[in-house]
Amino acid sequence: MGKYKKIAVIYGSDSSEWEVSCRSGEFVASRIDGTQYDVYEILARFGEWKLVAMKKCDAMRVPFPEGSRPEVDKTDFSVKVYGEKIKFDYAYIVQHGVPGENGLLQGYLEMLGVPFSSCGAFVSAVAFDKFACKCYLRDVDFVKCSPDVFVRNGMDLDKVTEKVASTLRFPVFVKPTDAGSSFGITKVFKPEDLKEAIQFAFTEGPMVIVEQGIKGRELTCAAYAGKDGVKALPLIEIVTDNDYFDYDAKYNGHSQEICPAPVEESVSAHIQEVTKMIYTHLGCEGVVRVDYILAEDGLYFLEVNTIPGMTSASLVPKMVRTAGIDITDFLTDIIENS
């Protein structure tokens, strides 16, 4: 028997990524070991947490129709079903974006003393913000960070444009600091297009990073903490039909995700080691995916995903399959060692 009995899988979010999050959450819930755990699926959006379905050990999944879904009591993280009060003793977080990826949900669970699957509140907040995370990694000697300019809504965009033009090489990428799935991102080739791209990024959040584009191969690697310590999974190389790995390339089939990545074994081993070092340096927990550009002058850090996609077609499940690990065993390892 495991350490926990009643697992709440929390998905949905308050961000543009909520639909992707639902698909990830449904996949995770379906793959958690049903012989060990009772699994409860919670859709959480804008403060409304509802029980979507439950599956008790060795039983069928029971869905609740929309309009009659039991509401989660957030005072003690419980739900009442058919007159029975169920208090969850573990949370598997699959919320992409706010509040599950920026530390807010983790802070709530930490205050209640409920164990969960991801990084803690502080680490989640730092990792979720692309600029803050790069600041934690700028001075390390095991990975490079591309030059950038930080922008907050309300700053003089003429001055920002001048600074970008004088300090960075075009093309540049304009990104919200706290959004995922490539929402709000624009690749900009000339200074006169910068303002519009920044304003577009502001539709996702109040802070933006303008980052110098790095030419090279896009690679990603995941690390996780299990019973044998921190381990890295096989690399994936992303080859896109589009100009970069945008939302369309990610979710509409306009990219190849080659696993294992066709790189030399020494390169693969090095990137896996760097991924574990970043994981440890930031103080990560659970499974985390790190994205890179492998350029002629070295390995460049792009971003950390502390709640990576977990649909059947997502990158981490592909890595898990390539490693020869059963996805149910993988999830059990994370749950039992959180």
Image: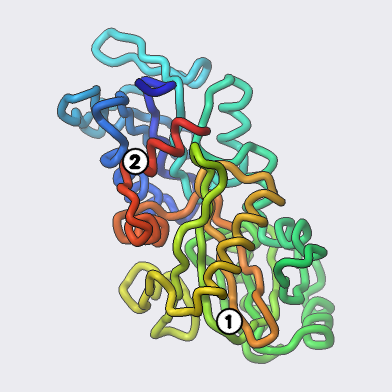
Q: Which residue is mark 1?
A: 187
Q: Residue at x 47, y 56 (%)?
A: 16
**SS under mark 2:** helix
Can residue 193 be seen in this snapshot? no
Q: Nearer the viewer, mark 2 or mark 1?
A: 2
Left or right of residue 57: residue 289: right
User: In this picture, is 135 found above or below 61?
Assistant: below
Quarter of the image that includes the N terminus: top left
Q: Residue at x 73, y 88 (%)?
A: 169
Residue lying farthest to the left in this orientation: 60
- Please state which of residues 139 and 51 is positioned toward the viewer in this rendering: 139
User: In this picture, is 81 found above or below 328?
Assistant: above
Q: At label 1, which amino acid type do we have?
A: Lys
Residue lying farthest to the top in this orientation: 83
Q: CA distance from mark 2 to mark 1?
A: 40 Å
Marked residue nearer the N-terminal end (2 or 1): 1
Left or right of residue 307: residue 209: right
Q: Which residue is mark 2?
A: 329
Q: At label 2, which amino acid type do we have?
A: Asp
**SS under mark 1:** strand
Q: Residue at x 21, y 31 (%)?
A: 63
Can residue 213 be seen in this snapshot? yes
Other-residue count near label 2 (Cα within 10 Å), few / some / many at <14 / 14–19 / ≥20: few
Q: Residue at x 38, y 40 (%)?
A: 331
User: In this picture, is 215 found above or below 4?
Assistant: below
